[in-house]
């Protein structure tokens, strides 16, 4: 359980997340993930990083129960941890491929929205249920996956979009049966890793440099409204209904 790293092929590092039962990451998990991705990117032998997960789904966001138990300290930790993990994916010195299966919710959107490419299983679905959990954030990253008006509708309704729908919008590279997900992600990673390593790193820096949105600053701006909702007591009233029958 936790965050692990492996090198299945030369030039490729796989960072795998495993926090049962649903990969809702605790504060320590977000920071561990950030460090693993950054470490992989710093390795001069690595030319592509694959971000994957074990278990029922790719990512269910933050551990709401931890926040309910530990209050503002956990909330601040989760916000800082998410910001670091999302930034680590975006700022990774080499391209990052997200291999997504099952649910990709909340913080999962922050990860895949900042990835360079997404390969998904045909059972994968993506969404931001933040408004139902007393939080705000990651619209920055959802906007990188779908057009603006669809992003807003998905955000306000907390609905999800399927891997096939995102593939139609061009944000998912390939959709495959779940059993073939890891192989498909490694296939794309291998094609990328076959390129000159130094030039790949230059290409990543160049592409980030022309990005029209500062994703780190934009996400932190969103997080400010999460703090406002918490200080007003609004977030607690919404969050206290999380997981309860009839909520």
Image (cartoon, rainbow, N blue to C red):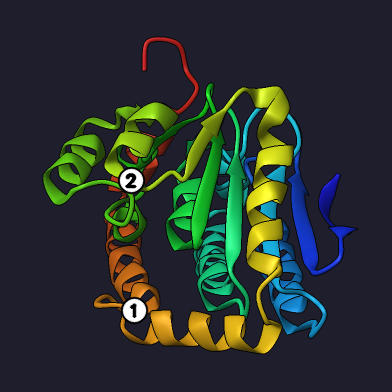
Please indicate whether residue 97 sits to the left or right of residue 134 in the image.
right
The foreground one among 210 and 102 is 210
Identified at 77% across, 77% down, the residue is: 39
Where residue 9 appears, as percent x and y from the top left, is 86, 58
The foreground one among 107 and 185 is 185
The residue indicated by pointer 2 is 170
Residue 72: in sight, yes or no? no
Circle number at residue 217:
1
Please indicate whether residue 234 sits to the left or right of residue 88 in the image.
left
Where residue 120 appears, as percent x and y from the top left, is 54, 36
Residue 145: in sight, yes or no? yes
Name the quadrant of the C terminus. Answer: top left
The foreground one among 188 and 219 is 188
Disc 1 on helix, strand or loop?
A: helix
Name the quadrant of the N terminus. Answer: top right
- Sequence-wise first label, 1 or 2: 2
Q: Rounded to the nearest whole Å, what is the CA distance between mark 1 and mark 2?
A: 25 Å
Identified at 49% across, 63% down, the residue is: 116
Where residue 149 appears, as percent x and y from the top left, is 11, 44
Identified at 27% across, 75% down, the residue is: 213
Circle number at residue 106:
none
Labels 1 and 2 touching (C-beta < 8 A): no
Disc 2 on helix, strand or loop?
A: loop
């Amino acid at each position: 359980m936790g965050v692990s790293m492996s090198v299945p092929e030369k030039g490729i590092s796989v960072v795998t997340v495993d926090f049962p039962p649903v990969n809702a990451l605790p504060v320590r998990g977000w920071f561990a993930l950030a460090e693993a991705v950054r470490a992989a990117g710093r390795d001069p032998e690595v030319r592509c990083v694959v971000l994957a997960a074990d278990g029922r789904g790719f990512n269910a966001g933050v551990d709401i129960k931890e926040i309910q138990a530990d209050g503002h300290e956990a909330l601040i930790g989760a916000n800082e941890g998410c910001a670091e993990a999302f930034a680590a994916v975006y700022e990774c010195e080499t391209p990052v491929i997200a291999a997504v299966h099952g649910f990709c919710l909340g913080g999962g959107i922050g990860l895949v929205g900042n990835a360079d490419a997404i390969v998904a299983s045909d059972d994968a679905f993506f969404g931001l249920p933040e408004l139902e959990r007393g939080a705000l954030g990651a619209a920055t990253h959802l906007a990188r996956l779908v057009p603006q008006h669809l992003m807003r509708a998905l955000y306000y309704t907390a609905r999800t979009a399927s891997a096939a729908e995102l593939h139609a919008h061009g944000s998912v590279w390939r959709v495959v049966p779940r059993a073939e997900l890891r192989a498909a992600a490694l296939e794309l990673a291998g094609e990328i890793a076959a390129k000159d390593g130094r030039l790949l790193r230059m290409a990543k820096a160049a592409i980030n440099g022309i990005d029209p949105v500062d994703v780190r600053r934009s996400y932190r701006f969103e997080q400010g409204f999460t703090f406002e909702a918490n200080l007003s007591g609004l977030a607690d009233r919404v969050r206290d209904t999380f997981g309860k029958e009839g909520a």
